[in-house]
Amino acid sequence: MIDINESVMQFLLAFVVVGPLLGAVAALLPAPPGLKGKSPEQAVLRHGVTVTGAVLIAAIVLALGFDHDQPSRMQASTDISWIPALDVRIHLGIDGISLPLLVLTALLTFLCALYSYFKLPEGPAPKAFVALLLVLESGTLATFAVLDLLLFFLAFEMVLIPMYFLIARWGGEGRSRAAWRFILYTLLGSVVMLLGLLLIGLKAGTFDMMALATDNGRSLTTSVQVIAVLAIGIGLAVKTPMWPLHSWLPDAHTAAPTVGSVLLAGVLLKMGTYGFVRILLPIAPDGFRTFAPYLAALAVVGIIYGSLACLALAKQGAKGDLKRLIAYSSVGHMGFVLLGIATMTPTGVNGALFANIAHGLITGLLFFLVGALKDRTGTTDLDTLAEETGAALYGKAPRLGGLLAFAAVASLGLPGLAGFWGEMLALFGAFQPAAGLSRPAFLTFMAIGAFGTLLTAAYLLVVVRRVCMGALPQDAPRLTDVRGYEFAAWTPLVVLTVVAGLWPKALLGLSNPAVQQFLAGGTR
Amino acid sequence: MSSPAQSLAASLVQSVDWLAIAPPTLAAVVGLVVLVADLFVAEHRKTLLGWTSVAGLAAATLLLLPLRDGDRSTFCLTGDATACSYTADRFTLVIQFLVLGGALLAALLSVTALKDARKELPEGEYWFLLLSSAAGAALLPASRDLATLIVALEVASLPAFALVGLRHGDRKSSEAALKFFLSSVTATAVSLMGISFVYASTGTLYLTQVADRIQNVDGQLHTLAQTGVVLTLVGFAFKTAAVPFHFWVPDTYVGAPLPIAAYLSVIGKTVGFSGLILVTVVALPSYADVWGPALAALAALTMTVGNVGALRQQATRAYSAVRLLAWSSVGQAGYLLVPIAAAAYSGDAEKSIGSTVAYALMYGAVNLGAFAVAALVGRTRSLNRVSDYRGLYASSPVSALLLAFFLLCLAGLPPGIIGLFAKVTVFSAAVDAGLGWLAVIMAVNVVIALFYYLQWTALLFRAPEGEPEKHRVPAPLTAAIALTGVLGIALSGAPQLVLRFTDTALF
C-alpha cells in the first residue's frame, strides 16, 4: 500500500521478533530514573504496554508496507547464517499466509498488556508477568516469521516455559496440574516433531523452508515423507489441538489467567495449524496426501466431540464452567481448520487460514468477556451464574451482556461476521477435495461438519439464553458495566470481527495467491 | 662411542615433543609441587596451595593454545612414524580443554569448600589428588595405545577414590569410596583382560595398528578377539556410569565433597566416553556390528534408568539436590552415548563423534554451573535438599536465574538454546544413522527429564518460607558461577562455537 524501503522492512521484521525479547530482559532490570512511575508495579506494566505497543505499530507498518500485489512472494526477508554446523540460518520473511497471523499476535498481545495494566491478574509480582508475556510474544511472532525448520522448532519451544509459568503462577484452581499437562503434552509432541523435521532436513539436505517448498517434496521419497508427516503431524496436532490429543487444552484454558487464555486460544493454537500449512503441505505433499483422509476424519470427530462436550456443559445442572466450555468450543473450531487443510484444495486451505484468524479474534474476545464476568461475579460456573432463571446480564450490565451475545453469535458463524467465512469455505473445500483424495469420504465429512455447525449454534444460544437473558429481580444488585479500559481492549476485536465478516477479501486476497502457489507445486 | 651403538640408541630412543605433552604434564607437576609445598607452608597460609593449583590448571588450559593446529604427535615408533602413543589432534585438544577447564571450575569450588570445611579436609593431599586425577584425565584422550590408555584411566580414577573418601571420620564418605573403588577396580580388571585378549590376537597395542590387524585375525583367534572387544568396552562403560554400571553414582556423589561430585560428574564421564570413542571408533571400527548395537542398547537403558531415577527423588530427602544431579548425570551420559552408537551405523563416524563432543562441552559448562549454585546453597543449607531451593530468587536473584538457565539447558528448552541445539545434534546423529527407535526413546526421555528439571526450576521462584537471608558469596564461587553463566549464555547466542566440532575433522 505504501512504499517502504526493503531494508527498513527487514529491520521492522527483525525488530518484531527480537524487540519483545529485549523488552523482557529490560523488564527484569530496575526501572531507569525518570521512568519509575508511581510504583515499580505500575512502571513495569507500563513498560509492557509500551513494548507490545511498539511491536504492534511495527507489525502494522509491515502490513502497510507489504506489497499486496504479490502476496505470494516472501517479503522483508533476511537470511543470515547462524550455526553453519547444523545448517541453521536466521531466515525471516513474511508472505500472505504469515502476515495476518503476525499482526493478530501483535494485536492480541498488546490488548492483553493493556488489559493487565488496569487489571493485574492475582498472583506474584507483575515484573515476571510482563517479562514472560514478552517472551511468549517473541516466541509466537518468531514461529510465524521464521523460514528455517530448526528455527521454527526453536520458536515453537520458546513459548512453552513462559506459558507454563503464566498458568502455574497466575492461574486459578487446579493450575499446577493444568500447567504440567500443558507443557508435558506439548513437549512430547514437539520432540517427536523434531525427529520429523530432522528427517526431512537430513534427507533433503537443507532446513530452509523456501528451498524445500520450491522442491515440493521431489527430493524426498514417499516413505520418508510419510514418516516425516506422521512425526511432524503429531507435534502440530497436539498444539492445534486435534481430537484425541486435545485433553491438555480444557484444563489449561480453565486454569490460565484471562490473559493467558486469550493468548493460548488466540495465537498459540494457531502455531499448530500454521505449521500444517507452512511445512507439511508444501514440503511433503505425498506424505500429507496419505494422511489427509485420517486428518479430516479426526477433524470432524473433533468438531462433533467439541460441540457435544459444550452442549453437555451448557445444560442446566451440569456445573459447567464457562471457560471450559469455550475451550471445548475451540476444539470444535480448530476441527474446521484442520478439515479445511486436509482437503488440500485452495478453497479449503484459504478457509482454514481465514477460520484461524477469525477464531483468534472471536475466542480472544470471548475469553476477555468471561474473565470480566468472573471479576464481577466471582465465578464462571454456569449454574451458579444462571441459578434457576438465567443470569440476566442484559438487565444487570447491558453492554457486557450485549458484547457477550455478539461474541457468541460471531462464534457460531453468523453470516456477516468473521466466524462464517472460514467454516463455510472449509466445508466447501471438502465438497470437492483435491485429486487423489476420496470424494465420498470427504462428502461424508462435510455432512458431519455441517451438522457440527448446528450443534455449535445450539450450545452457544443456550449459553446466551442462560447468561444474558432471564428475569431480573427488583432488588438484584447491578453489576459494573463495561469499563473504559475494557472498551479499549475489546473494541479492536469487535471491529475486526465485523470487518473480516463483511470484507473477507481483505484476508483471502492475501492468503489465496500464496496458497495457490504452493498447492500448484512450488514456484509457478 | 662407536657409531653402530649410537645408531641403535637413536633407533630406540624416541624423540619427545615437550610442548605437545605440556598440558597434562604441567597439571601433574603442579600437583607434586603442591604436595611438597604443603609440608613447608604455615597453617594459616594453606589457601596459597589452592590458588597455586587453580593457577596451574589455568596455565595448563592456556598451554592448549599453541597446539591448536592439532597436528602434533610424539612417542612415535622410530620405525613407523604413524604409530604414536601420544597424539595432540583436535579431538585430544577439545577433550583436554573440557577436562582441564572442568577441573579448573571444580578447583574454584574446592577453594571455598576447603575453607568452609575448616581443616576437616587435608589441603595438600586434596589438591595433589585433584591435580593428578586431572592430569590422568587429560592424558587419556591423547593416548593412542592401549597400555597408555589404561594407565591414563587409572591415573584419573585412583586419586578420585581417595578424594571421595577424604572426609575424615565420615562413615558415608568412606563407604561411598569403598563402593566406588571396588566396582571400579573390577571394571578395570575386566578391561585389562579384554585388552590382553586383543593384544594376544593382534600382537600390537597401538590403536591404529589394532584397527588394521584385527581385520585379518586368524580364524582360531576370532572368538578371543571378539571377547576382548566386549570386555574392553565394559571397563569404559563403567567410567561413563552407563547402566548397569551406574549404581555407584548416587551414593558416591552424596558421600563425596560437593566439588568432587561436580568433578566426577563432568570429568569422570569425559574420561569414560573419550576412552570409549578411542577404543571403538579408532581401534575397532571393523567391529562396529558388535559395539554399535551394544552401545545403542546401553544408551537407551542408561538414559531411561537415569531419568526415572531422577524422577523418583523426593524433594524433601536429605541431599536430594545432589542425588538428583547424580541421577540426571546418568541420564545425560545416555545422551552422550547415542552418537557413539550412531557412529557404528553412519558413513561418517567423525561427524557423529563430533555430536558427542559438542554435547559434552555444553553439558560440562552447564552441569558445573548447576553444581556451583548447589555449592552456594549448600553453604547455608548443609542438607542440600531440593526443597531448600524454594524461594532462592528472593534471596539471590542472579544465582536463581542462572540455576534456572542451567537446568533448562540440561532439559534442552529455550531459553537454554545451547542445550536445545546440543540435543538437536544428538538427535540428528541418531536419525542420520537410521537409529529411529533410539531417537524416539530419547525423545520420551527428554520429556521425563523436563519434568524434574522444571519442577526444580519452578521451585526457585516460589515464595520463600520465612525471611530471605542474604549472604556474602565468596569470590571463588562467584567466579565459578559467573564463568559458567557467561559460557552458557555466550554459547546460547553462538552455538556454532561448540557445534562446529560436528563438521570438522577431529582425528
Image (cartoon, rainbow, N blue to C red):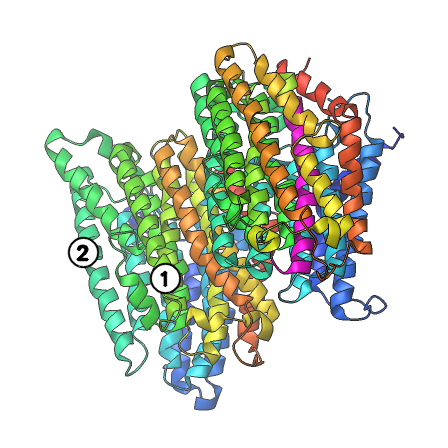
Quadrant in the rendering for residue B169: bottom left
Badge 1 and badge 2 both on one subunit: yes
Q: Which residue is located at x 89 percent, y 30 percent?
A: A2
Residue B326: numbered disc: 1
Magenta-highlighted stretch: main secondary structure?
helix
Question: To which chain does the residue with label 1 belong?
Answer: B
Write down the region rendered in magenta: A350-379
Q: Which residue is located at x 55 percent, y 78 percent?
A: B474
Left or right, B42 with respect to A58, comes to left
Measured from the top left, where is residue B205 in percent x and y? 25, 45
Earlier residue among tags 1 and 2: 2
From the viewer's perspective, is residue B172 above or below residue A197?
Answer: below
Left or right, B236 with respect to B497, comes to left
Question: To which chain does the residue with label 2 belong?
Answer: B
SS at mark 2 in the image: helix
- Tell which residue pokes out farthest to the front in this image: A474
Label 2, on which residue? B189
